[in-house]
Amino acid sequence: MSTAAAVRPTSAGAGPVASGAPAPARRRRPRRATVALAALAVLVLLSLALASRGTGQGELDPTSPAPGGGRAVAQVLQDLGVAVTRTTGTAQTLEAVRAAGPGGATVLVVPTAPLGPAQLEDLAASGADLVLLAPAPEVLEVLAPGLRRSREIETAQAVPPQCDVPAAQAAGPATGGGVLVEPRDDEDPAVSLCYGLPFGGAPYAVVEGDGSRVVVLGQPDVLRNETVADEGDAALALRTLGARDALVWYLPDPLDPALSDEPLPLSALVPPGLLRAAQVLGVAALLLLLWWGRRLGRLVPEQLPVVVRASEAVEGRGRLYRAAGDRAHAAAVLRSASLGRLAGRLGVPVSAGTSAVVTAAASATGRPAAEVEALYRSPAPRDDGALVVLAHALDTLEKEVRSS
């Protein structure tokens, strides 16, 4: 098509009706499934966050019927007349010990959160029997200084008591393994080790004190609902925790401000199980994206409601320029398009500028460079006739370049 076609005067009523018809509104595809899944994920996370505190579903919680809970042991102890009190704060625990009265209390310390030095000192001075479940080294250092951690093994197997402690003798073989401890002084008469393993260390130790004792229970399976019925675990758990009239089941809350003077880490603010739930939801979202991507399949050409020919588009744009009387803009468009085509024909980079294209065109056609440059740098046409003349002149120059 010649360049003049872009500005050829036409009547206002010319041209197919289809080119001027309004385009139909683009159909919006609903994303209801994606929105519903996102809302469901938020509801699940909120439910876990709300349900993770105070519902008794945590690990070794005395009110939890889950496989890892401790409800079975707590229920049997209550049936035997032992008052079981669940606490999560240090002050609450000490208050429960004082409320136990003359009969005294046993405090089971579950390692749900690290205890600070002040809390450990308070427990040591409480006068209660302490049962330390899988204790950390710093806990042993304060509450059972005669013991130290030996190692930790995951293998759980039935082990005979191998000691004279009445609770272990009555229970017989029980589940070994877990956190193993050993005495700092092999000659310490106040320390008794039970369920020892051949390579050293024992998961059950008793340290006798003045009016109270500390029991280290390194194997949590002895208290769990799913394993308490194995071997002599039930008897060992009941005799260890039921030695006094009251049992304080202490589950330190990581959000308890009394545990540490330092700011709590961000991980302590995450409810138990929330991280795992987020991981599961992340995998589910990834699988959904993969399924959605495969569902789209290959690209399929869509049948357009209106087909507009290129010639009609050029003529329509020319009518717009004519109706607006914007001859300067129309001339600039014609010159820019002509320079682009000449640059490609002559092998001149477009970034080289107008002067480089003009010099190459003049050399190819034999015209004076000033004459060629005037076509691209002269003032804008004053009327439609001058614009048509410019379009024909540019078209003629391109033809000469093509034929050179």
Image (tube, rainbow, N blue to C red):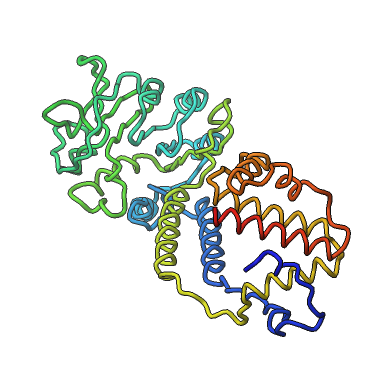
- Pick the front one: 351 or 228: 351
**Image coordinates for residue 232, horizontal then vertical, percent:** 19, 47
127 vs 282: above or below: above
279 vs 117: above or below: below
Residue 169 relative to residue 302: left or right? left
Determine the residue positioned at 31% across, 49% down. Answer: 224
**Image coordinates for residue 182, horizontal then vertical, percent:** 23, 23
Quadrant, the N terminus:
bottom right
215 vs 54: above or below: above
Q: Quadrant of residue 305?
A: bottom right
- Pick the front one: 241 or 210: 241
Determine the residue positioned at 60% across, 51% down. Answer: 342
- Pick the front one: 261 or 25: 25
Residue 353 relative to residue 240: left or right? right
Q: Is residue 186 at all visible to an observer of this figure?
A: yes
**Image coordinates for residue 112, horizontal then vertical, percent:** 43, 39
